[in-house]
Each structure stands twice: as structure tokens, then as C-alpha cells.
Amino acid sequence: GSTWRPTPEQALLLQACLLPDAEAREALHAWAGLAGCRHLDSATRRLLPLVWSRRRHWPPSEAAADAALAAVLPEVKRTWLDNHRRLQAANGLAERLADAGVPLLLVKGLPLALQAYGDLGLRPMGDVDLVVPYSQVQQGLQVLDAAGWRPLPTPLKHSSSDGGEAVLPAWALRPRPLQAFDDLFLRVRHSHGFRHPSGLEADLHWFVFQGHCDPGVDDALWSGATALAPLNRAAGSHPSPLLLVPDPADHLLLLLSHAARWDVVPAVRWLADAALLLRAAPGLDWDRLRLEARRRRLQALVAPMLALLQEQARAPVPAELVRELAAERLSRRERLLAPAQPGSPDWRGGVEELRYLHRRWRRLRQGSEAGGPVPDFTRFVCHVLGAPHPRELNRYAMAELGRRLGRDRTDRTNRNVSPEG
């Protein structure tokens, strides 16, 4: 199921983050009554720094809420330091890339912390998201390599147990070789992870939206990008004038598209990200968002998310836009051509991923767009996923299918068992 809808407890915490003071305090009081001293999940914990930043300006409140927030200050300080290191790394890469004639765009966490949150300590993140143009990705890869950034292993989607421990074959734990970033790979995946010896991680994008991997698809986004530095609201932070950020309408659409996909850690923080971005960009171009959602065939995906943003955060989302997008229906051909949509780690998610890979393979074969011969489908999938041989891929696929079918049966059994059972 979807992971972007908040639970009742998370909804209260989001209201404590985003509503006016009196209502926010009531929401925090209600949340403390529900949550008590129970263990907080990772998605909820990601909201606590923002709640803490508001709570510190209010008079004494609930003991339960104060107990939950008492341990947040050290986390805020640690996040501030880590994000400053990420910003310094991004500044350095922007200069190196500029020397190679490659522009650098930042998306998601780091620019949101600067532009929307106004404090690098309030937006925890695991990495920094860097974007270079597809036409210059090879130069970008060389710059990252020269700066000490090394590729991480090629990720296999949803290959994890219920406890989050990776269930992966040995070959999936090996870093992807730099020479394997050829056009066959670049035209299927939109990004890849890199790690620096300092411990920092970055996600390098050559396409901005997952599943939208055709040359030219991001041209309008690049032409609408602007410098991040004049938009920075975080005291003591100094983004390079070379760093770019998307137009707020494009950035909001990206946040919605990214959050809508299933993740092992629920993406409920997107509501805070989106609401604060709208406050920082009150003149957001809704027509631009509407046209881009249509062009990328994301209408049905983003309509309920915009409605929830309007409801939960009282964000100024035009009601007629939500109705218009919700009323639109994709044609059969558009549904077939649409990128892989949100999936869960059951057998349906695996089929969905396989269908996406097959569409990309057919497109590359039909147009000979990969700049060279395209192998048969099995070897193509091996190359994209980093499998050394079809035998290894088939072994993994059968084991993963069995695991997912087992999980699906377990989930259905649990849903059919009464609370007393």
C-alpha cells in the first residue's frame, strides 16, 4: 500500500509542525496522549526536529511531549553539522563541475533545508541529491571520481526483509564499476549513489524524475532553474553562487512524485517539505505544475497528494487544480507508456519493475538509441542490475519471487485474522 499517507499519530505531529500556534499546541497535546512513551518509528522521528523548533517558543506543555522532544536537541545539532558538511561538499563539487563546463542542480533535502526550513538542523537527510544534465553526465562522473567519490552497489528495489536487513546476493553488494555507466544503464536508471572517503553520500541524478529517462525530458526544468544562494534563509550557511535549484513548481512536483513511491521508511515528511516550500515560494506557478504533471502523466498520482496537502497543512493549493487533475483519465496507451508507478515489496512490485525494464529495453532496441547494440532482454537486465550472469539473475529472481509471494500470503492472513485471534 501507499506509504505517503500519514497515520493518525503522524497527522497530529504534522499539524504540530505546520498549523498556527494555538492549533499546533492542541495537536501536540493530542499526539502526546496517543503516542505516550511508546517507541517512535523512523518516519515519525524525522518530524521531531521541526516540532522541537516550534515547541521551544511555547510555554510548558505536556510532560509526555516534552519527554519525547527532550532528546531532539543533540540530534538537531548533529544534523546541522552533517548538513554543513554536505553543503561544503556540494560547493566544492559545483566549482569542480563548473571548471568542466557542467552545471549543478540540487534537489530535495539540502536545498529545502536552506530555502524552505531556513535551518540546516531541522531537515535530517541521508545524502545530498545532485543533478547534472544527461548530455554531460560522463563529465560529471569523471569529476566525482577525481574528487574521491566512488559508486555504491546498484540497488535492487525492495530487496529487504521486514526488519530492514538486506536480502541480497553477493554480486549486488559490489560497487558498480565506473565503466558500467554506459547509455544502456543511463537510459533506464535516473540516478546512482556515491560515497566519499569522509563518509558523506550523494545521489547523482542525470534525469530528475524516476522513470523519466529520455534525452530532453528535463530541458524545461533546467531552463527554469535559478541560483540557490539568493533564496537561502539559513543563517550561517553560504551556498555557492554556482548551485542551482529548480523552479518551485517543478520542485513541488518532484517531491510529490518521489514521495508517492513505496519506501521502507514511510515518506510522510513530504507534507512538511511541500508545505514549507509553498510558504517560501508564495507565488508558485500552478499552471507550470499542471502542464508538467500532464506532460509526465502524473495527474492521477499527484491529485490526491495535493488534496491531502490542502487538508492536512492548509496549504494554498487551488481546489480547481485538484479537481481538474483528479478528473483526468489516462488513455490505455498512456498507461502502458507511463513510468513504473508506486509499488510495494510484494510480487506485484516485482512485476511492475520487470514491465518497466521491458519497456525501456524495447524502446532502446527499436530506436537503436543506446549508441550501440542492445543485447537480449535477459542480458540487458543483468547489465542494468549488475548481475554477472543470467544464471545468477535467475537464481536471485526466483528467490525474491518466493519471498514476495510468502510475504503477500502472510499479509493477507494477518488482514483476515481478528484482533482476538
Image: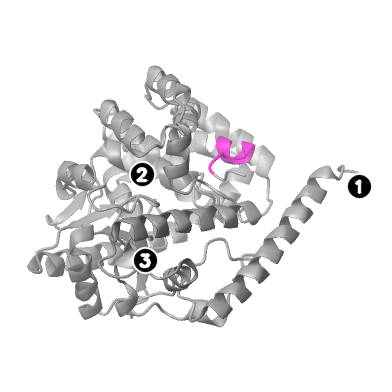
* Residue for point 39% across, 35% down: 275
Residue 302 is left or right of residue 417, and the answer is left
Residue 121 is left or right of residue 68, and the answer is left
Q: Quadrant of residue 5?
A: top right
Please, what is the three-letter code of the amino acid marked with disc 3?
His
Q: Looking at the image, is mark 1 or mark 2 nearer the viewer?
A: 2
Nearest to N terminus: mark 2 or mark 3: 3
- Disc number placed over residue 192 in the picture, else none: 3
Kindly report the distance in space between the C-alpha atoms of the residues bearing marks 2 and 3.
17 Å
Circle 1 sits on which residue?
Answer: 421
Report the magenta residues as a range.
Answer: 4-12
* Residue for point 15% across, 58% down: 103
Q: Position of residue 57 (x, y in %)?
A: 42, 39
* Residue for point 8% across, 68% down: 99
Q: Looking at the image, is mark 3 or mark 1 nearer the viewer?
A: 3
Kindly report the distance in space between the C-alpha atoms of the residues bearing marks 1 and 2.
43 Å
Q: Position of residue 9 (x, y in %)?
A: 62, 39
Please, what is the three-letter code of the amino acid marked with disc 2?
Leu
SS for tag 1? loop
Nearest to N terminus: mark 1 or mark 2: 2
Residue 219 is left or right of residue 393, and the answer is left
